[in-house]
Amino acid sequence: MKKTLAFALALIMSVSLFSACGKDTGGQDKEMTAALTDFSDPKLFEQIEPVGTKVDLNDYYNELGVECDMGIRATGGSVKWLGGGNVPLPTPSKTYTIAFSDYYTVDEVGAMYMEGMKQAAEEIGVNLITQDADYDQNLQNQAIEQWILQGVDAVIMTPCDFYACKDGIEALHEAGIPVITLDAPPCAGEVDACVVYDAVEQGRQAGDALREYLLANGSDMKGTIYYGTLPFIHPNAVTREKGFFQAFEDYPGIEIKALTGESPEDHYTAFEGIVAGDDSILGLWGLYSSATYGIMNVVKASGKNYPITSVDNDRVILEGIYNGEVLGSSCYSAVEGSRLALMLAINILEGNEVPAIIYQTNTYIDKSNVEEMFPVYYGEGKTLADYMAGNG
Amino acid sequence: MKKRRSIGQILIDFRTILILIFLIAIFTYLKPVFINPINLLNMLKRQSFTMIAAFGMTFLLTLGVFDMSAGSTVALVGIVLAYGLNKGVSAAIMLPAVILLSILCGFINGIIVVKGKIPAFLTTLATMNIYRGLAQTISDGKTISIKLKWLTNLFGNGTVFGIPTPVIIMLIFLVIAAFLFYKTKLGFYCRCIGGNTEASKVAGINVNLIQIVAFCMMGLAAGAAGLIECGLMNAGMPDLGADLAMDAIAAAVLGGTAISGGLGTIWGTIGGALIMGILNSGLALMGAQTPVQLLVKGFVIIAAILMDNMLKSRKTVVKA
Amino acid sequence: MEDFVLELKGIGKTFSGVNVLRDINIQLKRGEVFALMGENGAGKSTLIKVISGYHQPDPGGEILVEGRKTVFRNPKESMNAHIHTIYQELTLCPDMTVAENIVIDKQDKMPGFLLNKRKYVEIAQKALERLHQDIDPNAYVRDLSIAKRQIVEIAKAISADASIIIMDEPTSSISEKDAECLLGIVRELRDQGMTIIYISHRMHEIFRIADRICVLRDGSHIGTVDAAATTPQDLIGMMVGRSLENAYPKAHVEFGETILEVQDLCSDVFEHVSFSVRRGEICGIGGLVGAKRTEVLECIFGVRPIKSGKIFVYGREFHPKHERDAIAQEIAFVTEDRKKNGLVLCLPVEDNVNIVNADELCASHGILHYKMFRALAEKYRKSLNIRLANIKQPVSTLSGGNMQKVVIAKWMETDPQIILFDEPTRGIDIGAKAEIYSIMAEFVKKGAAIVMVSSELPELISVTDKIVVMCEGQMTGVVAHEDATQEGIMELASSKKAYEGDLI
């Protein structure tokens, strides 16, 4: 009797879980007139490489010592997105089913990619299927295999692993499904188009800001700058490092040293001793959000007042900027990235020529513009004040 | 002599098959593409390395021990392979070398458990960190891609008559594991030792040797799982296989292998791994996100252990 | 010269200075049932373990198998000499089949890597047929009853060509009917020329099957007699042997009102136990191992579920569901196995003393009041004369007697009115024993009541005011202090007749 009960319980449990998984909204095939994007509009885009050139990122990465062997099929050269604020979306001629695999949704960038994509898809009536790959390339590839079987029209992905994503991309290629990547590009496989950010510029913006601060405060420009980075070679890390080092090229008296970790806790541990014991510190830099978060907390706990700059626009960092704990951060908008990727997807599906690469804008955020820019990153109507009051 | 079994007992005895049928039916009803052979083969492909590891784990669990380091062995094997190939060492040398390496990983676990008399959980918890640390040291923490197309095809992406090679490798392991478990003294001794270590010692069974052999086999299974994961990823990755040991244990337990030792079943293990694979694939197809999948996986494991306990209580019901 | 299958010459065994066996000389003939008897702790188990290779005898002792001097370095060597032991704790693998279990210890005679299940079944079948038992060789052991499992063990032994089978209390946990069947098998094996060493406390069983009976007492061989030429009374005399000593001070206390009454108590393992205890009274529970005496205490303390019957405490009906219920009624339980459930061995003495009343000492704060802990521990160290270097030393470093005092101390602070003692002096030296008795006397002088389980007859007779005797889960008698004799109690302890007289 007990056993039968247990089985019934298991049955009910599983059925209720399945029903929690949500339902499909089948798209209606309504014919509409397509209104596509003009990538040559100088108000929206700055042409970097001309239309017709074969564009890839291999040289860019190989130069930095990152192995890269990727290709991009689109022929529209490369452009840089200029506009702040809302990315205008094209209108598709019918309801497309587009799948989006997000590398991770448990950090703010990943979460905003997902949220931005869902909102954008709803705006233009795209039937969106999503996946949180939980940093597991195996899961991402599994989802892609299933989407091929389900016959989606296009796939947008933020790769979990720069090399291991190759199989999924190639499988999509073979199935004739366009694939657009967002965030860091893959270093293997051939995609249709990419939305990327200029990570060298991000590092440079952070470096420039720190340098100018030091000069303005009469520093002798002799000492050490510590920065927090990942414990392994990551394409985003080497590019940002390159930009940051460029900012201090003219000051040989400054030594720039790396401390490594993955989580905020790791960075806290890594910086704790340095901040307490090293008097030669001029400033600190967080190469990505977790590093900055760890560094911010160490400095706060030590009671010292070192200048910190950062990359990434997580809300804790923006709050830190507002509170004066962080000088500023080089930011790009995940919401914008999602909209640009969807823009590319629709244009490809409608047969429009698209650029191979769209570079996102990096904006240096400091105390002067942090409130103004908050909604650009977190959506219309959201304010930093609300977030800080706990209503975010 | 034959007793009639109650419905409850029949349900328990065939629980794996029943759950499988139930899951396949419900997913097919909700998403017809689920039953598409390509989807099922893909599911098997993605589950193949967990299954292979679970075969090794079944031997260990039957013995009354388990191996937490299997996932780290996977990472180490993949990284060493990719690193060696990138340094220009021929695959003809690297392949046997990493297979030996995987067996060595298992052997080290076994020798520490047997000679050091440290419980398997602690030993493999330690070596889990050591093997993972080695993999990260060798690779500098980054992914190392493997360029040899034939190699990645052989272990990951290739197909033979439309069947993915990982599935074929898994089937080979299944046949070998089932043969060893059911038809040879190795499996017999594992069951004896897990069932009653003292009695086995008295009976003259070389308990230490069997434990070491089982750990070596686990190492080999992890090595094979590592080659498949490398093939699927076209790369050696230092963070590969993080969940492998737990998934393998879960698959074995789901299939009816007792975590307390003595009772094991290879057929059950393949069933348990199938349940996990079908849940994974089916839930992903339904658009369920990771949190939901984690929830379901957790509930399923609890349910499996509850059933395991019920089996046990059935055992002790018989009294003088 | 007679043909002995096994001869023990001058076997002694010393464990850390204590003589457990002294100069044992035994000869076993082919084809006899040789019963081994003695009180608990007489050295029977040690003797078996020497024969089966678990223990090596002290130098000077000799084991002769078939007239040849042999040394058993491990159990396997004993088995190779065709000696097979069936322990009370069966050693079968529950998740394997009968046939598989029967062939486990015969692997060296079965070369090859592959299993030959057909051959295994054949071997099992043959052995089971020899025993005339209808057990399916392919059945799983977990599905068999204890009695059937025992038969599988015997089949395992005879299929290994055993010439001597040692059976350690084979009938202690099976029903009368199954025991009957087992005795039949034993007789048949004997007729086939096998020698059986049979250990049992059941007097009637011994007389029905044994050819010779060997009695051990305090590690010495008292004598071996022909079963046909002896009586149960003789045997009991041999087993008990010693006269009463004065090492057992008896407190003389006025009895007060009845504070614990057990009426027709039944649980899963014992039935129909009734007794009552007054303030100032010490009630003993006597019987042999397996009489389920501890279980009665467990029921009173709420550890074991009660099937039927009633318990009255201070005149009110008491139905404990949990240990805490009993503690709330000021009942204390000094358990038999100090190391297992009496003490937390790795913790210091002071913590162990305060383990029961830590809640009260912490008052409402939930914070440990260490100063109080220490003070109390010091108090009991003095009053109970616990010999230790430091109250912070782990309990595991104390001697048995001092450990027992720590257990008692932990209960004393709760000021118990009913104290259950389970084998309070087991493994304790004579001096400490006397101290434990005087602590018990202190308790009753203060108006508490004691229920005490003991296997040591002299102690039981001297210390208690009355004795409830049990045998195999049955209450077989109540004896008043004045009427108690060792022989009388032994007889009740091995009789099967339920007590029908009045309670004292």
Image (cartoon, coloured by chain):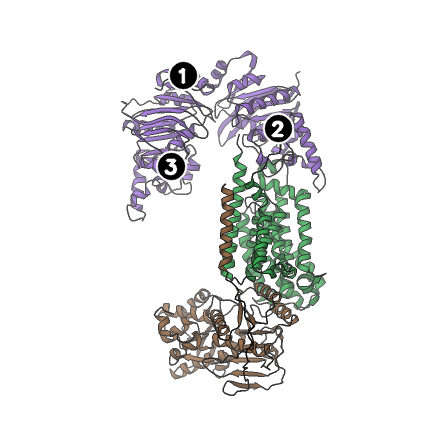
Q: Residue furthest top?
A: C229
Visual hue assigned to chain C = purple
- In space, the residues marked 2 and 3 are separated at their CA atoms by 41 Å
Q: Earlier in the sequence, mark 2 or mark 3?
A: 2
Q: Mark 1 or mark 3: name the one nearer the start of the chain.
A: 3
Instruction: Determine which residue is flagged by label 1.
Output: C485
Q: Is residue B11 visible?
A: yes
Q: Residues within 10 Å of mark 2 (few under 14, many from 20)?
A: many
- Mark toward the start of the polypeptide (2 vs 1): 2
Foreground: disc 1 or disc 3: 3
Badge 1: chain ID: C
Q: CA distance from mark 2 to mark 1?
A: 39 Å
Q: Chain of mark 3?
A: C
Q: Which image quadrant for residue C89?
A: top right
Chain painted in green in the figure: B
Residue that badge 2 annotates: C154
Amino acid type, residue under disc 1 in the picture: Thr
How many angstroms separate mark 1 from mark 3 (CA)? Answer: 37 Å
Mark 2 and mark 1 on one chain: yes
| Nearer to me, C218 or A78 | A78
Apparent side of residue C318 relative to residue B178 in the rendered image (left or right): left
